[in-house]
Image (cartoon, rainbow, N blue to C red):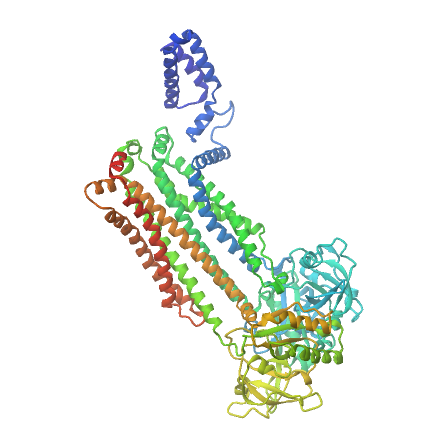
Amino acid sequence: MPEWKEEVRKRLAGMNLRPEREAEIVDEVSTDLQDRFAALQTDGRNEGQVFKEVLAELDARDLAAELRESEPSYRAPLPEGAPAGGNWISDLLQDLRYAARMLRKSPGFTVVAALTLALGIGANTAVFTIVNTFLLNPLPVSKISELVAVNTTSAKKTAQSGDLQPLSFENLRDLIGMTHSFSSFSGHSSPMAVTMTVNRSPRRVFLELVTANYFETLGLHPYMGRFFLAGEDVVPGASPVVVIGYSAWQNRFGGASDILGRTIRINDTPFTIIGVGPKGFKGVYAVFGPDMWVPTMMAAQVLPAQQKDALSDRTIPVFTGIGRLRPGVTMAEAQAEMKIAGTALAKEYPDANQDQSVVLRTLTEAAFGPERQTVVMGSSLLMAIVGIVLLIACSNVANLLLARASARRQEIAVRMALGAGPGRLLRQLLTESVLLGLLGGVFGLFLAYEGCQLLMALRPAEYAQNLADLKMNGNVYAFAFVVAILAGIIFGIAPSLRSSRTSVSEALKEETHSVGRSRRRVTLANALLAGQVAVSLLLLVVAALFLRSIEREYTIDPGFQTKHLALFELYPGQAGYNEVRTKQFYKDVRERVGSVPGISSVTWASNLPLWGHKETGITIEGREQRTKSEAISSVVNTVDLDYFSTLGIPFREGRDFTQDDRDISEPVAIINETMAARYWPGQDALGKRLELPGGKDFLKVIGVVKTADYGSLGEPPQPCVYIPLRQNYSDEMILYIRTAGDPSTVLTTVQSGIHDIDPGLPIDDIRTGTKVINQALWWAQIGVGLLGVFGLLALGLASVGLYGIMAYSVSRRRREIGLRMALGAGPGSVALLVLRQGMTLVLAGAGIGIALALLAGRGLSRFLYGVSGVDPVSIGGATLVLAGVAFLACYLPARSASRVDPLVALREG
């Protein structure tokens, strides 16, 4: 062996190289030396000098790094004395470095694949953010599993019936003293609208009355300042202090650092700010929360006139109890104790508590009330849909990897020839896929964040600050991380398995590069594409069904006319008005607004449309002996003259309220036809009498009107009692106006007229009738919008995948296409051949998708209004949209195939 070869081998001896690799380097040096020796005649040097230069260059090379790059399975020699065996951490880092280099070498593939995954992962993360905010972690309180909500209901009903009522303050206080299942027991009211005045600028905010230990029971700590002291919740009216929410501090006070100690006026009463609530806490309702909290002893200062005596009147239910279970006490044990306490209250105070039962629910359940099941079902549906979108994205990337694998067959074969086993190759290829998934996850998080910001921007402006904020916390980031890794495994497993089983002998032969296994790869890709088309059609049909459903909801007759209608919420009582001044204010506003050109009628009412106030315990004359467990419930609305004509509610019989229906005349009422039919079936309801809860006199029925929707659009008919404002004083009313044309043209004029009467009265909640309907359907609109976006996203991903596989198929068949055209096939016939291949996949997937849509429609039919789950318009429309987009995705590669030059194609083949 020549001397120079021995010298090279000495230098390679410590590298722990395989014999094959060592021979490659020796041959490489030999070739280099021969080239340099051939040039000696021109540069004047001798062979010894050249040999020394080559050895110096060899010593300067980092052979270990070169080997790791060309062969990731290479492992550097262990230091002397090191234990045998590999280091999995170093192996992983090595695999990651190599994977990063491979992705960097194919930037086009990496960008397309990462963005495709980002769409799927972003959609999943955005929906999970909604689920995490409202279902998994709805309230930022301590140990929520220990907290229960306490309400009352009829003894014959349960919490699941949805007929839950608040507790009176007296009952709440008695229950605190009668029970021992709780380490802490507190109470709170529902959020109520009040007038807050800061620097003579009034605005409407929402407030809750709470017991002094409310925050302690929830396990909360103030962000700034303090919460209420026990002594501040003892004497009525003695402690005008307020804790504001963190969001209100930021949005309404600009996050002022000197907020503590400031004085604000709430309903014309000065209150001192003593604390700021914890960040992210907006009360114990998952969706809507207050801006601030005041002690229960300030009830008379913030409650409307009808509830001013809430602290002393056991018949006025205002509060919901919250208890924290003692260690070792179960929910069932606490419920049994509450049942005993409720029975004791019924015996001691039968007038207020007869046949009433105390009911416990978990605080998580109470956060949603009767809508929890709908929220769970809707969230589950959205999670299933975005899961399908992610599978489509993974399928697309899997197809990309299958196409890319053909270009790497020789690389993989060389690595296997050098000793890399199938398991080692599989690990490396999966590492590349997972790294690609993580890259898609990073982009997906950005898309999810932007999507959540868009959703929050779509919240109704009137109370956007009081709605829950979507929270992208650690749970969301962990979810995105796990989904990214799973996606990398899902889309990478099949291509990796196929690549790791590459035949070395076939891959190293050029002629077998384009045949052999390609047909099986295309078959797998075709199966994935057919599945994409099927699930895309399924999602489009689901979106179309709900879109048709919400369109039908817009055609629902709510029982009143919304066109040319406008509403202004006004609270004169909160501005310090007494009864005399309030009545005069109502009269002045009617006269001033009624004289505005373009306004045809004006009236007052206590209820907003679709926000009806319901009362339980109505007594029908002649039926007083019925048990109170069957107490009559009804919507109760206090209205002024011309209310029914302003809203377009027709009379079925009887008369309207008149000027003569005053507080000195016989008490009267108007009922709807549902109440008349339910309690006086087959009789004339006119002249019958009923008594409202807490009322002193029976009311004579003087009219029957058409039943309207009082709580939601399309609701089951429910009773309603209308009572005249002139006999039933209220210091909180809604001004209704009907205009001859578009109501938006007179809103500013009306607002200015009210401001002229009293500039200190806030008028920041103005709604048109159309806006009322839009707000009632807001959640449905958001849901349908998300379904539509995800359906179109799925269709887009499937179409891109279809285009990609067809374009890849055309590129693989260029020689075949060139041969066909050389033998006489025209461009049209070639295009038709490719188009037929693609549309066959589409038709197969569409058939499967229609079958899936029919099954899904039957399951979703109970959530649809006025639309069948197998609605042919929805299915047909979705199919046409999919077919049109898919045809375009197939047509472009077909057109490209028809333009192939036969000579060029045959030469390339």
Q: Residue at x 31, y 45 (%)?
A: 896
Task: Say how many tags the image has.
Answer: 0
Q: Is residue 860 left or right of residue 893?
A: right
**Where, by quadrant of the figure, is residue 669 drawn?**
bottom right
**Where, by quadrant of the figure, is residue 399 drawn?**
top left
**Where, by quadrant of the figure, is residue 191 drawn?**
bottom right
In percent of width and height, residue 849 lies at 35, 59
Q: Residue at x 60, y 58 (%)?
A: 469
Q: Is residue 761 left or right of residue 412?
A: right
Tell which residue pokes out farthest to the left in this image. 823
In percent of width and height, residue 815 lies at 25, 39
User: In which quadrant will I find the N terminus?
Assistant: top left
Q: Residue at x 45, y 12 (%)?
A: 53
In percent of width and height, residue 615 lies at 62, 79
Give the vertical position of 830 relative to 776 (above or below): above
Residue 631 appears in the figure: no
Residue 873 appears in the figure: yes
Q: Is residue 311 left or right of residue 689?
A: right
Front residue of 495/564: it is 564
Give the vertical position of 184 relative to 840 (above or below): below
In percent of width and height, residue 901 lies at 27, 39
Q: Is residue 19 left or right of residue 581?
A: left
User: In which quadrant will I find the C terminus?
Assistant: top left
Q: Residue at x 50, y 60 (%)?
A: 379
